[in-house]
Image: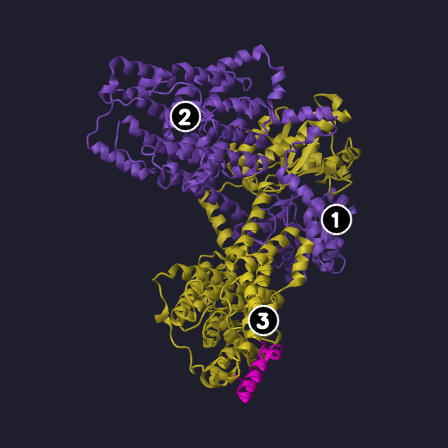
Chain colours: A yellow, B purple
Amino acid sequence: MEPNSSSNDNNKMQLQHHSSCLEIATMEVHRVVPPRHKSTIEKLKTRLKETFFPDDPLRQFKGQPLGKKWILAAQYIFPILEWGPNYSFKLFKSDIISGLTIASLAIPQGISYAKLANLPPIVGLYSSFVPPLVYTVLGSSRDLAVGPVSIASLIMGSMLRQEVSPTQNPVLFLQLAFTATFFGGLVQASLGLLRLGFIIDFLSKATLIGFMAGAAIIVSLQQLKSLLGITHFTNQMGLIPVMSSVFHNTKEGTKRPKLFWVSAGAPLVSVILSTLLVFAFKAQHHGISVIGKLQEGLNPPSWNMLKFHGSHLGLVMKTGLITGIISLTEGIAVGRTFAALKNYQVDGNKEMIAIGVMNIVGSSTSCYITTGAFSRSAVNHNAGAKTAVSNVVMSVTVMVTLLFLMPLFQYTPNVVLGAIIVTAVVGLIDVPAAHQIWKIDKFDFLVMLCAFLGVIFISVQEGLAIAVGISIFKILLQITRPKTVMLGNMPGSDIYRDLHHYNEAMRIPGFLILSIEAPINFANTTYLNERILRWIEEYEAEENLNKQSSLRFVILEMSAVSAIDTSGTSFFKDLRKAMEKKGLVLVNPLAEVLEKLQRSDDSGDFKRPDSLYLTVGEAVASLSSTIKAPSANYV
Amino acid sequence: MEPNSSSNDNNKMQLQHHSSCLEIATMEVHRVVPPRHKSTIEKLKTRLKETFFPDDPLRQFKGQPLGKKWILAAQYIFPILEWGPNYSFKLFKSDIISGLTIASLAIPQGISYAKLANLPPIVGLYSSFVPPLVYTVLGSSRDLAVGPVSIASLIMGSMLRQEVSPTQNPVLFLQLAFTATFFGGLVQASLGLLRLGFIIDFLSKATLIGFMAGAAIIVSLQQLKSLLGITHFTNQMGLIPVMSSVFHNTKEGTKRPKLFWVSAGAPLVSVILSTLLVFAFKAQHHGISVIGKLQEGLNPPSWNMLKFHGSHLGLVMKTGLITGIISLTEGIAVGRTFAALKNYQVDGNKEMIAIGVMNIVGSSTSCYITTGAFSRSAVNHNAGAKTAVSNVVMSVTVMVTLLFLMPLFQYTPNVVLGAIIVTAVVGLIDVPAAHQIWKIDKFDFLVMLCAFLGVIFISVQEGLAIAVGISIFKILLQITRPKTVMLGNMPGSDIYRDLHHYNEAMRIPGFLILSIEAPINFANTTYLNERILRWIEEYEAEENLNKQSSLRFVILEMSAVSAIDTSGTSFFKDLRKAMEKKGLVLVNPLAEVLEKLQRSDDSGDFKRPDSLYLTVGEAVASLSSTIKAPSANYV
């Protein structure tokens, strides 16, 4: 709305419409009627339903016989009952291939990510066994490959390490990890049960892209520890300590380990080859650190390891909350992405309950936090997975590994696990997406950058908090400074559009037509009042310059004002007072807005038909005739 | 949008339009054009201007000669230069009457409010002398009566008392009060200079009504101390300690002071009468506490009392921030209210600077926090004040009092000050406004109630914080759950409106027309996606029931979508994918939204003329013809 362009608008002025369409509109002016009366309870019910049950989850139950309702309820809680009965051998053939494929990823990644979380490697395998089985029964996505993921492992490891050392006090550390997993699951299931899933929406795509790239860089730098074989490495997160530690160690002349080249190549091949090499050359005696002996057997129970008291409870709950929300965000996003690709629906709230229950069960069977992993789910999808049975196949493969193949990992070098982590997380740095965001929305790019730099230079939690804070601040700023746009008539029609967007739009002399493009509430009434009075002032100043007929009516197009509060209703009263002689006309106020305006308005001004119209065209046509009647000098 | 009412909508179906208007629209379909290209810098400039300079404060300077510009600049900084030269004896006659009237209020209230802030009574008089003079030079309101106010006094007193006792350590307490006043002024002036005045808008009317009523009750209960003559009274804020203290003392049989009845009546009369009575009966020797000897003379300098170090600095800054914002809110609201009544403008940011400078100057001349007081400004206005000169008259009267009349207050009983405070603050409890809020907006009422109960049962700061938090949460909830409304055709026109609001509106077979009523961003794309797919599902389910022609086009009316971010542009891409065979048509996307959509859209889908229309009517007319062409069985 540059003021200097408004002088051009004068050239667009037209004195009178000549469209036959307008004539018809003048004939029959539509009345703006108040909406059907609803009680407060009724309104509250509708509002609560739209807020918490937008997907109307129970609509399939309507009008069904009781027996059918029971079956539907069972299928609702256990989606496996829905697709299970129709499961066929043909589907199984697809699922077994994809299941074996993701197992080949899940085993090395499970071991690696557990190390990333400072947990014993075997916990990563345990976490790839129980949770996928739970998800198969409860989950509604067909493509999700469940297991530990890098980001959540990183956050859990670095947060818990703030208070407890995983090397000096490994049992306590493990207890805290299981307890944090329990709280994470509790948070996830609660969000689903309370239908508060929209909370994860506040992590916008831009935030996540920045956050993941930042976390990937932190993780990669940390893995320099394994990759460069540095032993005295800082345990702190954050770029500066990591960098200075690397720099420090490099200066001291630490040599690269001999097997550094193995880091390229597919995870399982790397693991097998490197294990064979270590075994053949007895490299564990030449400075290569290896995983060491792993215990055989399935997940031992761990409910006796959950600690709901003690001095670390606060940290554990915070860790559970943050890892729970972050892993939930990844799981839900992955589920939705592949559901959209294959054109089926996943119910967000049900998924949250499934993931939550899976982590609660996991926390008492020696598993740490798990979710649907993006990279493995993509592999699962590409390998042709048809149902969640591919998770069962993976789970059984992991089981076989746990029962019989554990001795084979004894010689797997830690360096190869570091390489696996780095190759996995480097894929999280999404430069094309960042470029696309820069192209479309500079503010979103700023949010992304804050998340990225915050995670690298401050900490994971604070980086996220800053990015979410800025995103919310932007929304609030948009509300605080709503746009007001001057509308003009599109020649030969009764359409009114933004004068600065459509060059052919023309002003109607004597009318100032403004569109308000936001809900009106306490945060913007002061601004709107000032801005509208300035529009009027500018309009009149220009009129004086051009010796035009004076401003008679201010028309506010209200189609975009979706809500109003008590400050908003006062605003209209004040505005009407402030512009005494000019007529204030509202066009198309929506049901709720109209109702509140009329209820607040004791003078009945907003009930008079000449201050309420259904379209701008009708308002202009109808009011033009009232101008002509009393004084002839206006036209 | 109750699902059960949609069956009624079927009765409203119409097979074909027959309006001549529609025919015309079909002839000439208006093209949606992208807006004029603007560079990022240009956009940033416009955005910054609309955010921080909505009132365009420098527009009067445009095109003026240099000399004139200097004069305008001086007048801009010192509004007294604007109205001073035209000041006349006639105006002065009005101002002297109103000035004397508010002085008669300011003197007893000044003394009382200083006591409320646990400060020596004379500080209240000092604060009614210097700040009004500063405001006269810098302020732009003609009605504001400047001086100490009850709420800010209460907050300052109760916050500072958390760390320092005003009775045991009165000098330190006074130092902290002056320093807090300095910080308060600094905050106020900075908000004005940085044009961040919109921050005070977040204290909504509902919040303030609840807050003031709660504070009034707390203050009144505290004054029971003076009124009931209780000496062992709790210094804590909050209802429960105050109540228990009253109860405790009453049980012990404390007698009411003899002069309790004086509490009714006008402040000055009460002060004079009670002082005379005390003097005549020597009541100070019979258990009536009096103010005692007050020092004569004008404000001593106090800049040497400002403490910018030490252990209390944090509390002092917090106190300054909160009292600064609260008193600013009162001052600005009062200024705006009377400006609106008399139809002149006050510049919010300039007022903030004026009030801020006035408090900074005040803090070094023995004044505590001051602002425009609501009650005294109303008296000022009603007594016929014409300019800020009435503040000068008041100030001079206070000066005379300070210089010559101080011995007269020696015998003024404290109980009368308590009575003055109670009568002043009881007027802050605005029951009719609360009732009006209940009538119009139940959620605003909830916010009000939270502020009210929070202030009474928790604390002033937390009560305010809770109410502001809930208000912001409501705005975010509106953004997270935007309304989508199904539109229908108003018979005989090409107007489309909410089917549930306008009963005569009719559906067009084969078209689902939805209006989205909020900006589309990360916080609501998931919801919108689910909700729109549910609309489609419900529409198709009903069609199957009624054996109607199938859904061919989904038209999204975008007039109310004022902004979009990268999540929003992805949402449209996903939506288009999800509804493959149906056409997705956008109607009237606004300039910024259209630009971002087209920039994000590599496929060019949102550039094709058959997916973008200027009005719903044109879209329906144009697309109906494409349905008819390929298959004849649709009509």
Q: What span is in magenta? A: A255-283
The amino acid at mark 2 is Val
Question: In the image, are marks 1 and 3 on the same chain?
Answer: no
Between B601 and B501, the residue placed more toward the observer is B601
Using the image as rendered, state which of residue A560 and residue B394 is in the foreground. B394
- Magenta stretch, main secondary structure, is helix
Give the residue at mark 3: A422
Q: Are marks 2 and 3 in contact (CB under 8 Å)?
A: no
**Which marked residue is nearer to the observer: mark 1 or mark 3?**
3
Q: Nearer the viewer, mark 1 or mark 2?
A: 2
- Image mark 3: chain: A
Asked if disc 1 and disc 3 are in contact, CB closer than 8 Å, the reply is: no
Q: Residue sitting at 59 percent across and 12 percent down?
A: B88
Give the amino acid type for the residue marked by disc 3 in the picture: Val
Local crowd at mark 1 within 10 Å, few (<14), some, or many (≥20)? some
Horizontally, residue A402 falls left or right of residue B42, namely left
Image quadrant where residue A382 sits: bottom right
- Amino acid carrying label 1: it is Pro
Circle nearer the viewer, 2 or 3 = 2
Circle number at residue B123: 2
Of callouts 1 and 2, which one flags the residue occurring earlier in the amino acid sequence?
Answer: 1
Q: Chain of mark 1?
A: B
Residue marked by disc 1: B34
**Do pointers 1 and 2 mark residues of a single chain?**
yes
Residue A594: x percent and y percent? Answer: 56, 38
Q: Do labels 1 and 2 touch, CB within 8 Å? A: no
In this view of the protein, which residue sits in the foreground, A155 or B511? A155
Q: CA distance from mark 2 to mark 3?
A: 68 Å
Query: Of the numbered discs in the image, which one, if any, rests on residue A558?
Result: none
Residue B489 makes an appearance in the image: yes
